[in-house]
Amino acid sequence: MQVIHTPIPDVLLFEPKVFGDDRGWFFESFRQDLFEQHAGRYRFVQDNESFSRYGVVRGLHYQKPPHVQGKLVRAIRGEVLDVAVDIRKGSPTYGQHTAQRLSESNHRMMWVPPGFAHGFAVLSETAIFSYKCTDYYAPLHDAGIRWNDPDIGIDWRLPESETRLSDKDLRQPMLQECEGLVLES
């Protein structure tokens, strides 16, 4: 498995080696020892999966302490633009984001560490998206940032007229209105 660094050092892409022939393909999608070597020691406690249609933007979501989540995400079917925004106060990359294409054909997974808001846009007709999470969903600690915050400046690679969001995501505050997470010492 190849580990690819993004412009934000703590956000990583994991690209598996795919073995294919005329029968189909096989790849190792997760290996704890390799993950820990590059991302650190985390324990995954919950897996989630979503189905979405073209133009859907989900995010930008995060959980507040003490239930911050790290997420290892991938597109099982279709293609998405996956986005991680650093919301760790005091971080040299605070307020910056990285956007990476994840698809069923590139098999890439993105590690979104605790302290980042996460979202994705569906670029294909449909997509099935998978999340491995380091903490359980905690509704009282659920939070988010507006998907189109101009201070973050994400190019979702969708025409705005075709972008579809939930009511909750349309009402999220701007980053400067949110409480940033405190960096661990």
Image (cartoon, grey):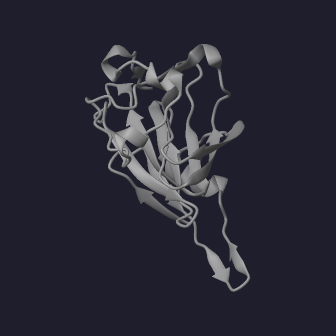
- Percent x, y of residue 19: 64, 78
On screen, residue 23 above or below 55: below
- Rendered residue at 66%/26% (across/down): 137
On screen, residue 103 above or below 149: below
On screen, residue 140 versus residue 146, left or right, reads right
Instruction: Say which quadrant the C terminus sits in.
Output: top left
On screen, residue 62 versus residue 162, left or right, reads right
Task: Give the residue furthest to the right.
Answer: 23
Instruction: Say which quadrant the N terminus sits in.
Output: bottom right
- Percent x, y of residue 141: 57, 16
On screen, residue 39 versus residue 140, left or right, reads left
Taking depth in this image into account, of 119 and 90 the one nearest to the observer is 119
Which image quadrant for residue 117?
Answer: top left
For residue 63, say whether it is visible: no
- Percent x, y of residue 29: 65, 60
Which image quadrant for residue 4?
Answer: bottom left
Task: Give the residue furthest to the bottom.
Answer: 22
Taking depth in this image into account, of 52 and 88 the one nearest to the observer is 52
On screen, residue 110 versus residue 174, left or right, reads right
For residue 144, say whether it is visible: yes
- Rendered residue at 51%/41% (across/down): 56
- Percent x, y of residue 77: 62, 57
Task: Give the residue furthest to the front.
Answer: 161
